[in-house]
């Protein structure tokens, strides 16, 4: 339900300090780009710094696990 809601809202990339195994699996199935950032980093800081352009595609995140 949450994955479909994100897709319906046009979300393409999900950013978090950590992802649980279940969330990671659902996001992969939903074909989202997934990015881990240091805990405490604000999304606004990522956008202002232009770091969002360098977020890892989900396939690269999968190889880290």
Image (cartoon, rainbow, N blue to C red):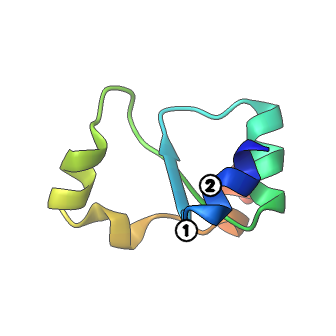
Q: Which residue lies at the image location 30% right of the left edge and 45% below the top edge?
A: 43
Percent coordinates x, y for residue 8 in the rendering: 64, 64
Question: In the image, 25: left or right of 9?
Answer: right
Q: Which residue lies at the image location 83% right of the left edge and 34% below the top edge?
A: 22
Residue 65 visible here: no
Instruction: Specify the farthest residue to the bottom.
Output: 53
Percent coordinates x, y for residue 17 in the rendering: 48, 33
In this view, 47 is above or below 16: below
Instruction: Specify the farthest residue to the left.
Output: 48
Percent coordinates x, y for residue 36 in the rendering: 50, 45
Q: Which residue lies at the image location 75% right of the left edge and 38% below the top edge?
A: 23
Percent coordinates x, y for residue 51 in the rendering: 29, 63
Task: Give me the C-alpha separation between circle 2 and circle 1.
Answer: 6 Å
Label 1 crowding class (10 Å Cα cut-off): few <14, some 14-19, many 20+? Answer: few
Front residue of 12/33: it is 12
Tag 2, which secondary structure? helix
* Residue carrying label 1: 10
Image mark count: 2
Contact flag, marks 2 and 1 (Cβ < 8 Å): no
In this view, 65 is above or below 7: above
Residue 21 visible here: yes
Question: In the image, 16: left or right of 23?
Answer: left
Question: In the image, 14: left or right of 22?
Answer: left
- Which image quarter holds the C terminus? top right
- Which image quarter holds the N terminus? top right
Corner quadrant of residue 49: bottom left
Tag 1, which secondary structure? loop
* Residue carrying label 2: 6
Label 2 crowding class (10 Å Cα cut-off): few <14, some 14-19, many 20+? Answer: some
Q: Which mark is residue 1?
A: none
């Amino acid at each position: 339900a949450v994955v479909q809601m994100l897709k319906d809202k046009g979300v393409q990339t999900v950013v978090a300090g950590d992802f649980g195994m279940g969330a990671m699996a659902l996001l992969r199935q939903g074909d989202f780009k997934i990015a881990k950032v240091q805990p405490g980093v604000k999304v606004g800081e990522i956008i202002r710094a232009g770091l969002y352009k360098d977020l890892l595609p989900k396939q690269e995140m999968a190889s880290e696990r």
